Amino acid sequence: MVKRRATILIVDDERINIQILDNALSDQYNILAAMSGEQAIKVALESRPCLILLDIILPDISGYEVCKALKNNKQTSHIPIIFVTAQSLPEDELKGLELGAIDYFRKPFLVPLIKVRIRNQIELVQKTAALEQLAWIDGLTGIPNRRSFDKRYFEACKYAVRSKRRICLILLDIDFFKQYNDYYGHAQGDVVLQQVARALEQGVTRPLDLVARYGGEEFVILLTDSSEKEGALLAEKVRQKIEDLAIPHIKSNINRTLTISVGVTTSSNDGGSLDSKALLETTDACLYEAKAMGRNTVVSADFRPRTPKSI
């Protein structure tokens, strides 16, 4: 896998300073440049660089004001900023650090030292991003976890109410999975969970839809802008996809192969409020009914909130 090059934004009103830093860093990083404070804010918002090297003296607003603006914006507040300036008074450095900068370089540049310190900061940014990503991913299957689903579901419900659109929930459970683990062992059970996750990802192809591990042997699919019929058809598609894997399951009462039961519920699009908890509960009830009907089946139901409330 090719490692993505980090992007650094250099903000300085002197072209020669930008050129020196570009020559020193461009072999390892993607370099962007801005020569004014307003331009720096615009580029940072558009490009979201991994690191900003920011001069204090700029032709329009000061680097301090740029730093304050970026740190007060949720979209850019996470970007580390290093002040690069000719100002050498301790109070100048203190002010920059108090505004949220992580370091302070003085001109004239000592290029080898700058390269090492920038490398350390980029590595820290990348490690932090990797850890943050892991917090949203299920460690076993590699797909989004319950925390990730909860966040996306909350956002999808707000979108559905605001845009008068439907969302669809598909909740599925591997049939007789406890018996599978007891007979084949938990290590093989983990392999099956991974196989099911891959099959679900392959079956859900729209970019904005989500497949997540809901917990244990349960998985959930979140569809945006989807009708009840579309949701039911996709649920049947993934049910058949799991059955077609033909994974032996001698302790199953259904064809001696691994199967899933599926519940599907779609919200209304009447522009009213949406009870996100009730939508989940209704989907779970559909899944329970699918199991009661003999498993390896899909149960779908229109969703109309019994006691609507704002999310």
Image: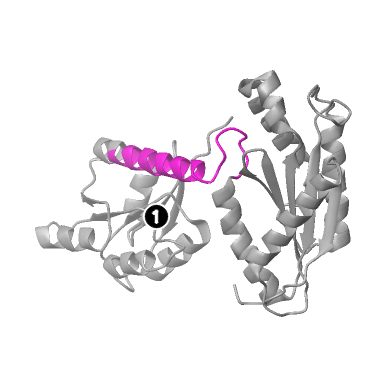
Which quadrant of the structure image shows residue 141?
top right
Residue beneath the point at 70% across and 70% down = 160
Q: Is residue 208 left or right of residue 246?
A: left
SS category of the residue bearing label 1: loop
For the view shown, which residue lies furthest in the top direction? 184
Q: Residue furthest front?
A: 292
Residue 229 can be seen in this image: yes
Residue placed under numbered mark 1 in the picture: 79
Magenta part, dominant SS? helix
Indicate yes or no whether the magenta region holds residue 68: no
The residue lying toward the viewer, choosing from 141 and 187, is 187
Does residue 36 show up? no
Judge the density around disc 1: few (<14), some (14-19), many (≥20) Cα neighbours within 10 Å: some
Picture coordinates of residue 75, whole percent (x, y): 46, 63
Q: Is residue 126 magenta?
A: yes
Q: Residue 161: image x %, image y %?
A: 68, 74
Relative to residue 130, is residue 217 drawn left or right?
A: right
The answer to whether residue 127 is above or below residue 183 is below
Seen at 28% across and 59% down, the residue is 100
Give the magenta-colored segment's residue range: 117-144
Residue nearer the viewer, 121 or 214: 214
Name the residue: 85% across, 49% down.
Answer: 298
The colour mode here is one colour
Identify which amino acid the numbered label 1 is placed on.
Answer: Ile
